[in-house]
Image (cartoon, rainbow, N blue to C red):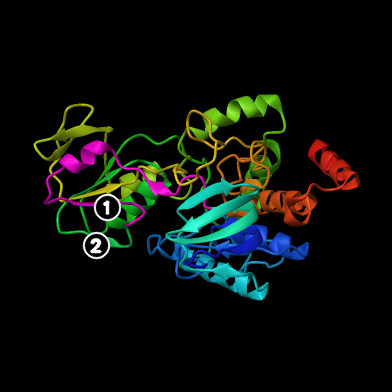
Amino acid sequence: MNGDNSSERFETVIIGGGQAGLSVGYHLTNRGRPFVILDANERIGDAWRKRWDSLRLFTPAKYDGLAGMRFPAPSVSFPTKDEMADYLAAYAARFDLPVRSGVAVNGLSREGDRYIVSSGDQRVEADNVVVATGGHPNPRVPAFAAELDPGITQLHSSDYRNPSQLQEGDVLLVGVGNSGAEIALELSRTHRTWLSGEPAGQIPVRHGPAAARFVLPLVRFVGHHVLTLRTPVVRKALPKFASKAAPLIRVKLKDLAAAGVERMPRVAGVQEGLPVFEDHRVLEVANVIWCTGYGQDFSWIALDIFDDGQAPKHERGVVPGEPGVYFVGLELQYAATSDVVLGVGRDAEYIAKHIARRGPDGRPADAAENARHSEEVAR
């Protein structure tokens, strides 16, 4: 990107070099369309490398590959986060995808018939822009966290790597999702561990190779082909589904109990620098890890494409109000699998086809191409 008054210009700019952005790049490459991928991280796959050290994927390797390149591991094994990161780097290299690393995009706007993508004082022009940063990139922590005693070590789960980051003494994890459960189980080996909140449920089978062979294929089929936005009933139900945390998958409540993890109600606030719970108990701990999820933040996009809740208005990732603007990797973009590795490729291909149909320089596709597009949407 240039820092002077001149701007580079691309037919398509993809913002985000994770599995969503790389997938779009792969499908555009297959269609012979020029593009560039801008990613804030220094290396492809760093978004995975920065997760906690012991993290493994929940999906087996046979579902973790992107189009055109299988994941190099036994089909029913569960890759580590570093193996996933290395796979993404190898994927970009194999297909020679033009990724520019270390470019943190902080602005998207329109000037005339072109979109302007900004990174500090640098900018590029584009006919098409694909936002592939995911729908929930920003860690969410309650406001009252700032009231905790400054002597308490606080981390969000996105910053947790391993137990060495914590000081001696008890640790409280807030949030009983999969991150909270897995980190709590790990910390229970070295710290007295408390876990606050209630889970949204738990998968009723033991996670592992047997489930990968016999259960996960069914779960994948339902999430990928049944729980989609194609039918009115599902469209009505999925927002409620999305508002709930995912059920516990690998670590179950009985595993936590067996490890000595002690359960607490929801955290209600802070009292004299210590966490206080809904039952009014106060807990003295040395460490708090907020496993409280992530929030959407598209405030850097200066386009009128958001609803009252600041979610992008789109149809399967295509923004009707701004021809040439697309999203990939959003939660429930089209199906329950849209924001995870095993589902993002289908949405990426759909968006790449849409871009190709627009023609060079954003010109509308011809009537025959539009007819084929309508047939595909109908299917």
Horizontal arrangement in the rendering, residue 114 relative to residue 356 (left or right): left
Q: Is residue 26 above or below residue 240?
A: below
Check the picture and name the quadrant holding the C terminus: top right
Q: Nearer the viewer, residue 170 or 302?
A: 302
Residue at (23% x, 59% y) in the render: 190
The mark tally for this picture is: 2
Quarter residue 209 falls in: bottom right
On the question of residue 71 being in view, the answer is yes
On the question of residue 64 being in view, the answer is no
From the image, tell me which residue sits under label 2: 165
Residue 298 in the image: state x and y as whole percent: 47, 43
Magenta residue span: 133-159
Residue at (68% x, 72% y) in the render: 95
From the image, tell me which residue sits under label 1: 155
Residue at (67% x, 37% y) in the render: 320
Q: Is residue 115 above or below residue 122?
A: above
Q: Are marks 2 and 1 in contact (CB under 8 Å)?
A: yes
Quarter residue 189 falls in: bottom left
